[in-house]
Image: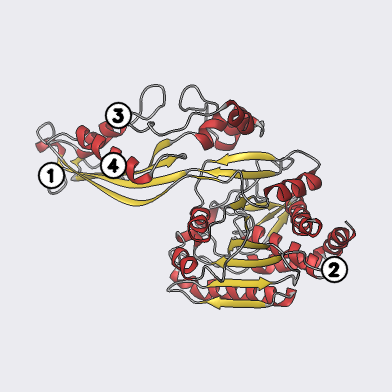
Amino acid sequence: MESTQKALIYFQENLATFMDKYLDLLRIPSVSTDPERKEDVQGACEFLANYLKNMGMEKVEIFPTEMHPIIVAEKLSGKPGAKTLLIYGHYDVQPPDPLNEWITPPFEPTFRGDYLYARGASDMKGQVMASMIALDSVLRTSELPLNIKFILEGEEEIGSPSLEDFIEKHKDLLKCDMILNPDSGMVAPDSPTLVYGLRGLVYFELRIDGPKADLHSGLFGGNVANPAIVISEIIAKLHNPDGSIAVPGFYDNVLPLTEEEKTKIASSHISDDTYIKLTGSPKLYGEVGFTALERQGARPTLDVNGLYSGFIGEGAKTIIPAYAKAKISCRLVPNQEPGEIYNLLIKYIAGLVPDTVRATLFKHSGGPAYLADDAEGMQNLVDALTGTWNRPVTLKREGGSIPVATTMLNFLGVKSLLTGFGLPDDAIHSPNERQHIPTWKKGIQALIRFYMSFASE
């Protein structure tokens, strides 16, 4: 379409200006978990609100919360029967620690080769800017063929404590036909990716208490149960030798993978060697009978995320620790209900605890799995990605969880289109986070095509 080409040309001709805006946003240290950065988070919010106003969004409003504000913006096409697209994003970032591992300062964006290095370059300021720059290019050159709304929050990296309540109270304001969430990524630079499934989560903490205080191991060793040993023995019994989870009933509601599903998952063509290279592990491990890709997004897991007990400083201290703690998470698949799984875990672990210690479980969070292979607008997005990369789209079931997708489905009744233009080795949440700029530019072109695809409907 001629109007699409105009927007694509405008983007290319104004790339330097758009890049400057991207860099300016990256320079704002909007670390949501740090109280000393509260003004910086507010600054990032105001930066984006001003950009939305300058590009021609008709309504731009900043809503205060108990912590960091939420932006809602709207642009109506004026066309009868036009569909409404809601775009989600977050402008907060993870802390940059450890600072000594950054090659260049985290909030001084730096180009090295095809990569732009900065905290938030990929997660998710780069993706927010891609969606806004694409829209800016359309608004400067053409009539908008659909209504577009934005909801941008500043608390995603701390669990979005204000978002669910906000969405529930502002359902009319956020009413839409489609939702675009570009907070996922691609499996490789030449493989445009759509995530159609997310795993759910149960996250809990197990604490084992023994003596009332740390004891001298020479005086009491062999007569008092050691909580560190007890918790290790419990953890060792959570899995079977074949890598499956030993909790009775854990798999009762897990749906078997169909041949069609297996073919879809295998379409990304990621080899075991790729995983080994990304992780640095000597060899892959996992549930027998499934490929690495199937285990990543379509099978449930149980992992220990943290262990603590006794003396862990330099040198030696001979004690029996008073307690031991383990943080444990389960990634869940469709049909597994988080509350049911947690109750199964409580029952199983209780049966493993000897009467020489006391055990306590604390549930931190939970959420169901999510499937969106029938999300409204998916074919438009597939066509836009295919037309930009000239390659078929990889459909992926993501191993992680994106709670906002479930929240929006619950309150707005709309499934999300999950995509993004980050790569697996972007080092998000780690030192030297980066964005592959050629991929980012293609992503903007794909979003221009996506927005404009509704002109022909």
Upstream in the sequence, badge 4 or badge 2? 2
Q: Are marks 4 and 3 in contact (CB under 8 Å)?
A: no
What is the x, y in percent for residue 105?
61, 61
Mark 3 secondary-structure assignment: loop
**Looking at the image, which is closer to me, 305 or 433?**
305
Identify residue for label 2: 141
Identify residue for label 1: 211
The residue sitting at 37% across, 30% down in the picture is 245
Q: Residues within 10 Å of mark 3 (few under 14, many from 20)?
A: some
What is the x, y in percent for residue 197?
55, 43
Marks 4 and 3, how far apart at CA: 17 Å
Kindly report which numbered mark, 2 or 1, lies closer to the viewer in this rendering.
2
Q: Residues within 10 Å of mark 2 (few under 14, many from 20)?
A: some
What is the x, y in percent for residue 29?
56, 67
Identify residue for label 3: 237
Total marks shown come to 4
Mark 2 secondary-structure assignment: loop
Q: Quadrant of residue 233?
A: top left
Marks 2 and 1, how far apart at CA: 72 Å
Q: Give the quadrant of the N terminus.
A: bottom right
In this picture, is 273 found above or below 313? above
Kindly report which numbered mark, 3 or 2, lies closer to the viewer in this rendering.
2
What is the x, y in percent for residue 25?
65, 68
Q: Is residue 310 visible?
A: no
Kindly report which numbered mark, 4 or 3, lies closer to the viewer in this rendering.
4
Upstream in the sequence, badge 4 or badge 3? 3
